[in-house]
């Protein structure tokens, strides 16, 4: 995965990390969010983390020379040699 600068000087977007799994699982229970998502309100942090890992693994399969995924769930660029 390539690092993309998503910072306009006011707002900075960062990649999802393991700690976001619990936050997302809690947030998705909100009735207003339930109106606009297909995720069930019973989603838990372990399920979210599993989905994050799968997505990171898939992204790394597309660019294997530039990315590896630790089992921590954080995509990590492969160091240049």
Image (tube, grey):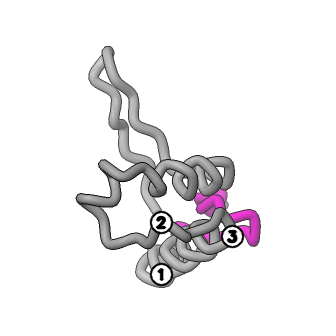
Residue that mark 2 sits on: 41
**What residue lies at 65% left-to-right and 63% top-to-bottom?**
45
Residue situated in front as seen by the camera: 41 or 23: 41
The reply to whether residue 80 is in sight is no
Quadrant of the image occupied by residue 10: top left
**What residue lies at 39% left-to-right and 28% top-to-bottom?**
12
Residue that mark 1 sits on: 58
| Secondary structure that dominates the magenta span | loop
Question: How far across and how far down the image is residue 79, in percent?
Answer: 66, 57
**What residue lies at 48% left-to-right and 81% top-to-bottom?**
58
Q: CA distance from mark 2 to mark 1?
A: 25 Å
**What residue lies at 64% left-to-right and 53% top-to-bottom?**
22
Residue that mark 3 sits on: 46
How would you rate the neighbour count of disc 3 (Cα within 10 Å): few for under 14, some for 14-19, many for 20 or more?
few
Ranked by sequence position, the earlier of labels 2 and 1 is: 2
Which residue is farthest right?
71
Q: CA distance from mark 1 to mark 3?
A: 18 Å
* Magenta-highlighted residues: 66-80
């Amino acid at each position: 995965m390539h690092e993309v600068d998503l910072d306009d000087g006011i707002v900075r977007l960062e990649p999802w990390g393991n700690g976001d799994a619990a936050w997302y699982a809690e947030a998705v229970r909100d009735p207003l969010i339930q109106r606009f998502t297909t995720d069930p309100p019973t989603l838990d942090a372990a399920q979210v983390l599993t989905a994050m890992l799968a997505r990171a693994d898939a992204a790394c399969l597309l660019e294997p020379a530039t990315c590896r995924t630790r089992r921590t769930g954080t995509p990590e660029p492969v160091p240049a040699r």
